[in-house]
Amino acid sequence: MAIPSNIDAHAKPPAAIKEVYKKFQKLDAAKLDEQHPDLLDLSSSSARNDDLVQVSHIRELPCDLRQVFLDFLTSSADHITSREARGNLHGHQQRTTVYEFKILPGLYIYPSLLPPAVQLALLDKLLHRDLSNPQHKTNVHMHYDVPYPASTPVGDGDSSASRSSFFNSAAMDLVFPPKDPNTHKAITTSQFLSKKLRWMTLGGQYDWTAKQYPSTAPPPFPADVKGLIDCLFPFMKAEAAILNLYAPGDTLSLHRDVSEECSAPLVSVSLGCDGVFVCGLEGADGQARVVAMRLKSGDAVVMSGEARYAWHGVPRVVAGTCPEFLGEWPSRGQTDGDVERFAMWKGWMAGKRINLNVRQMFA
């Protein structure tokens, strides 16, 4: 599909799509726990609305999903043996049903795609390793000079195996000085992780203000995360990503992703608390085609074809819905000693929703 020439990155969303967004933003929390007629939940076959979705035979997943996940789990020195990794994947279904939305062709959902072990490992890599890499910028860099924690030994004490993480106790004393003391006050590591951190960029460092990518060469995309995404979604290349972090009460405004130099599909992976995802297009007649779905931890969404440039946003994060196996992260992760090492942060993830939004930048 060619890149549309009439898309403005600064345009306002259509009123009809905005109306659906606002409805779920204002909806009473108790009603989200019911079977809301306008909110699609594909976590069980009984909740599927056949008027809205159809089983897709277009988006094919690898034949051996378990091997793809095993390769990811053993792709770095994270003290996970092949036997342990295989055990963590035991019982995970080899095939995942993929659904396409009838009113928005090209919009696909992969319910429960990532098994628990892969979700935990992905969090470890993104928030311990990649967040501590100065090449990957965050929203905090806009107003603060960000100090980075020193590496600390992990595992059996081998100094060659180290982890530099903001969640380490040694990083608790870090102070983030403001670039303009007249506008902002210094913050601590606790404030950074609990309240201030809203997004991080991987690979191409997207400029949210200018709504464009810098002309300079981007830093390398994390190889193991790229390998996982490229294997699961071979119709696009992972070259840039935005990791969004939410708490209940946070939102992501309606927008379109139009800054890439190609129209390759967008991929979004959900971790943590449930989120309401609204996506829609306005036709030439002014009529809108809009869907709202409840995304759960481990789900993936692909926006391609006609839906590639659809308006989309997150009007709601549902409190109290983080899966139990993720709720104790980072004190429960994929490496030896996590329970003790990150005890002070136990339960951090229970109040978070994290989205990894991956895109291809170049044709």
Image (cartoon, helix red, strand yellow):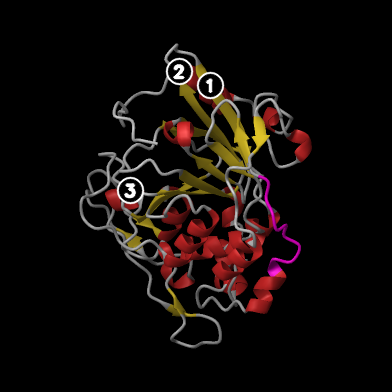
Name the quadrant containing residue 347. bottom right
Measuring 21% from the left and 55% from the top, which residue is drawn there?
A: 216
Q: Helix, strand or loop at disc 3? A: loop
Viewer-side residue, 88 vs 34:
88
Inter-mark Cα distance, 3 to 1 = 29 Å
Q: Helix, strand or loop at disc 2? A: loop
Residue 325 belongs to the span the image colors magenta: no
Q: Which residues are magenta?
A: 88-97
User: Could you tell me if the residues under marks 2 and 1 are in contact, i.e. CB atoms within 8 Å?
Assistant: yes
Label 3 is placed on what type of residue?
Ala
Q: Nearer the viewer, mark 2 or mark 3?
A: 3
Q: Position of residue 297 (x, y in %)?
A: 62, 49
Inter-mark Cα distance, 2 to 1 = 8 Å
- For label 1, the residue is 289
Mark 2 nearby-residue class (10 Å; few <14, some 14–19, many ≥20): few
| Image: 258 above or below 240 | above
- For label 3, the residue is 363
Q: Is residue 164 left or right of residue 53?
A: left
| Image: 191 above or below 57 | below
Looking at the image, is mark 3 or mark 1 earlier in the sequence?
1
Measuring 34% from the left and 49% from the top, which residue is drawn there?
A: 361
| Residue 241 visible to the viewer | yes
Q: Is residue 231 left or right of residue 91?
A: left
- For label 2, the residue is 283
